[in-house]
Amino acid sequence: MSQDNLLVVDSVTKRFGGLVAVNKVDIQLKKGEILGLIGPNGSGKTTLFNVISGLYSPDGGNITFKGENIGGLKPHKIARKGIGRTFQVVRPFGDMSVMDNIMVSGLFTAYKGKEKSKIEEHCHELLKVTNLEHRVDAEADSLSLAEKRRLEIARALALDPNLLLLDETMAGLTHTEVDEALKLLTRVKREYDLTIIVVEHIMRAIMSISERIVVLNEGRKIAEGTPKEVSENEEVLKAYIGRKAI
């Protein structure tokens, strides 16, 4: 096992009654990498995110982050260790301002000894990075879908993470908005020295941004490789029969 690995998912399993949603999945993620995670609906992608981020405890296997076993820890403890995430369904604090939404996450880093003024400064910086500066005082419910998705990213970044888990942050966006989202992800990866796992159904997006891709189907990992290798894999093509995206 390479010491360069920031995250190691080792034979992780998650069951819900008789359903095995994640079945002995292995993933090794190097620091600074962008990994794509794809698969048909119901293949276990979001469940795996939920296990890594602590919403669910694994029923088998181990999850190691920065050399420490984090499997089964509570979500707030995992967040404090440096893992931030977004969710498929955007759920900001609707009647709070954009700035206050980001500050809720930012204040979570106060345990590191950060002064409130420094946290506010960082959150204002994130407003600029995510192109939400002009909406700073707007209620979150008034934002467009694209703006809400950028707000989700800003809130995750406010946690000051090392690893970012992005769950369909481009869903529902227009072609132009997807292009803008890709530019944003490239920028934040570079500026904040991030490692990123991206779950996405928009294949042109995930194929263009990912250095490596893992494919899940019915809870199992069925393929792993470069975007080109994965797109030509027969088992992947079979899993996506009837889908024009691949």
Image: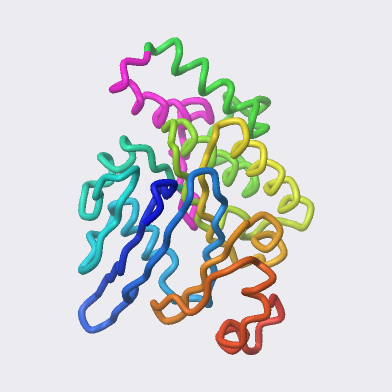
At 55% from the left edge and 49% from the top edge, which residue is drawn? Answer: 33
Direction from residue 195 to residue 52 in the image, left or right = left
Residue 201: x and y, percent?
60, 67
Which of the two residues, 71 or 158, is positioned nearer the viewer here? 71
Residue 65: x and y, percent?
33, 47
Which of the 4 image quarters holds residue 109?
Answer: top left
- For the question of whether residue 137 can be seen, the reply is yes
Which of the two residues, 157 or 196, is positioned nearer the viewer here? 196
- For the question of whether residue 152 can be seen, the reply is no
Which range is magenta? 87-114
Q: Is residue 13 placed above or below 97 in the rendered structure?
A: below
Q: Is residue 3 placed above or below 118 in the rendered structure?
A: below
Q: Is residue 216 placed above or below 207 in the rendered structure?
A: below
At 65% from the left edge and 47% from the top edge, which residue is drawn? Answer: 146
Tell whether position 97 is magenta. Answer: yes
Q: Is residue 18 placed above or below 208 in the rendered structure?
A: below
Direction from residue 84 to residue 238 in the image, left or right = right
